[in-house]
Image: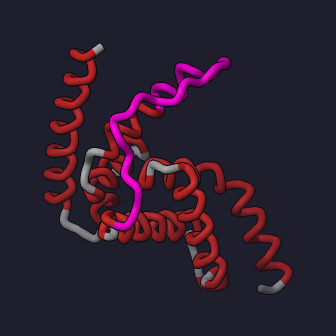
Amino acid sequence: MKDVDEAAFTAFVADAGDRLLRFARMLVLDHGEAEDALQEALTRLARHWHRTVTPEAYARKILLNLARDRGRRRHLVARPTDAAPETTTGDHADAVAARKQLDMLLAGLPAKQRATVVLRIVEDRSEAETARLLGCAEGTVRSNLSRALASLRGRMGDLQETT
């Protein structure tokens, strides 16, 4: 990379890095794997930095593809379990518990449904934009979201009954 490009890339990572990590964390669920996915996405972005018009969108698309690939290799990676969450002390205990519950709920969804929920609900993207990012039709986005939300509602009801 040229010095000017390197400075621009560094500034981009400083500005968008946290947002991209949160996005990756929602798609991948495991914090370490999300960091690895983000590092891989940034490495790929750096290789194409000179011709990338919208680097954050490009990085998000790479993260989506990495999460989709990971979903295809699900049998090769560890899966979250219904084991009791680790106990945490401190001011953020409720946030950590809520995050673990969200992770458990999202982990039960197929990769495409999880990506749809993250893009439509968490990222507040339009159906058209979500369809473009996932490479599918808008109707598929609607049906994936409907199925995912029905599944999440059912599991949330089950969680509330057990507590």
Determine which quarter of the picture holds residue 8.
bottom right
Give the quarter of the image for residue 100: top left
Residue at 50% from the left image edge and 55% from the top image edge: 24
List x then y, in percent, for residue 4: 83, 79
Judge left or right: residue 88 versus residue 106.
right
Regarding residue 133, the answer to whether it shows in the image is: no
In this picture, residue 13 sits left or right of residue 106: right
What residue is rendered at 64% in x and 49% in y?
18
Depth order, front residue of 53/118? 118
- Magenta segment, which residues? 76-99
Q: Above or below — where is 83 with respect to 143?
A: above
Residue in the image at 31% along x and 51% along y: 114
**Residue at 70% over, 63% down:** 12
Q: Looking at the picture, how far across and down is residue 93, in whole percent?
A: 58, 21
- Vertical relation: 6 (above or below) 101: below
Q: Report x, y in % for residue 94.
A: 53, 20
Does the image show residue 7? yes
Identity of the residue furthest to the front in this view? 83
